Amino acid sequence: MANNKVQLANGIVLIDLTSDTVDASHLALGYTAHDASGAAITGTLRSVLTGLKVPSASLGKNGDFYVQAAKIGTLTSDKHSYINTGITQNALYKVEIEAQLGSAVSGSYDTFFGCRNGNNARFTARFNNGANGALEIHKSTTPTTSYTTGSTGLTKNSFVGTYHKITVRDYCAMDGLVTYGLATSNTTDFPYPIFVFANNDRGTAGDYASASVKTWKMWNSDGELIQFLIPAEDDQNVACMYDLMTDTYFYNSGSGSFYYTAGTVSRGAILWLKEGGSWSVFHVYDTPI
């Protein structure tokens, strides 16, 4: 039987819980106490921590949430620079990039991302080499001999000074609107990782783009987000991209330069949950917060 008040025969009160306001929902998760009735309670309130980087293992306690917010800036390439994502198309379910072009150049294939295995087996988003060439999506469907391609209806001039979000899965979507379907399977082996700002042609970068990128994302075959790159500067003020999923900086692998412009508005967040002493991604929010 719970007791919420202990009073001696002479009227002296030793313990009085009757005016206490604590309850399980306002007590930190896992902690114990007694409420106003004298009943034992265990706290259910989770702490919510915040930051801009991946939470360290020493931060917080089991049951805590951590909101990792991102202020999205821009990273600009001078047409001689690129990011090596380190991930091949074989393991992917979907990719997405938000980018714009710096200029519409004649006689140049301008590539937002890509890799090529030889002959015409490739996985790219690029503009053809006309002065106002159309954006094309290439996704291989049979080993080294053919690929599915389609024009998005947007041209180089459509991307000069204007950001668009390109999503490639078994379809191509532009700013959230599906423009056409692509093959649902891919049997071509791509041992070469995808490059951003250039095409990876069997280990050699080419068809660079003078472009700016806000976000780059990749999902694995299980539909899990495995890479989320945003523009950044490291602690030495070197322009690069920062992976929100792995707390890793990705630097320029080319001969040119990157230029970073800081963002001012928080856009998107990753919600982490700590269990068993380790943080894991609980949910990804891809909208402004």
Image (tube, helix red, strand yellow):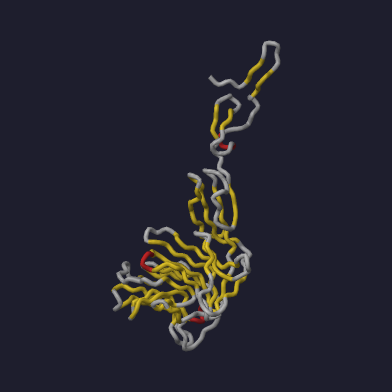
User: Which image quadrant: the C terminus?
Assistant: bottom right
Residue 289 in view in this figure: no
Q: Which residue does the image show at 67% across and 19% down from the upper left?
A: 14
Figure check: 2 above or below 126: above
Q: Quadrant of residue 24?
A: top right
Q: Nearer the viewer, residue 63 or 246?
A: 246
Q: Tell me residue 56's x, y (percent).
A: 55, 52
Residue 175 in view in this figure: yes
Q: Quadrant of residue 238?
A: bottom right
Q: Nearer the viewer, residue 144 or 271?
A: 144
279 displayed left or right of 21: left
Q: Nearer the viewer, residue 19 or 141?
A: 141
In the displayed image of the protein, which residue is found farthest to the top? Answer: 9
Q: Tell me residue 282's x, y (percent).
A: 48, 51
Figure check: 98 above or below 64: below
Q: Tell me residue 199's x, y (percent).
A: 44, 77
Figure check: 252 above or below 62: below
Q: Which residue does the image show at 40% across and 70% down from the upper left?
A: 172
Q: Quadrant of residue 114?
A: bottom left
Tally the numbered discs: 0
Q: Which residue does the image show at 57% across and 72% down from the upper left?
A: 75
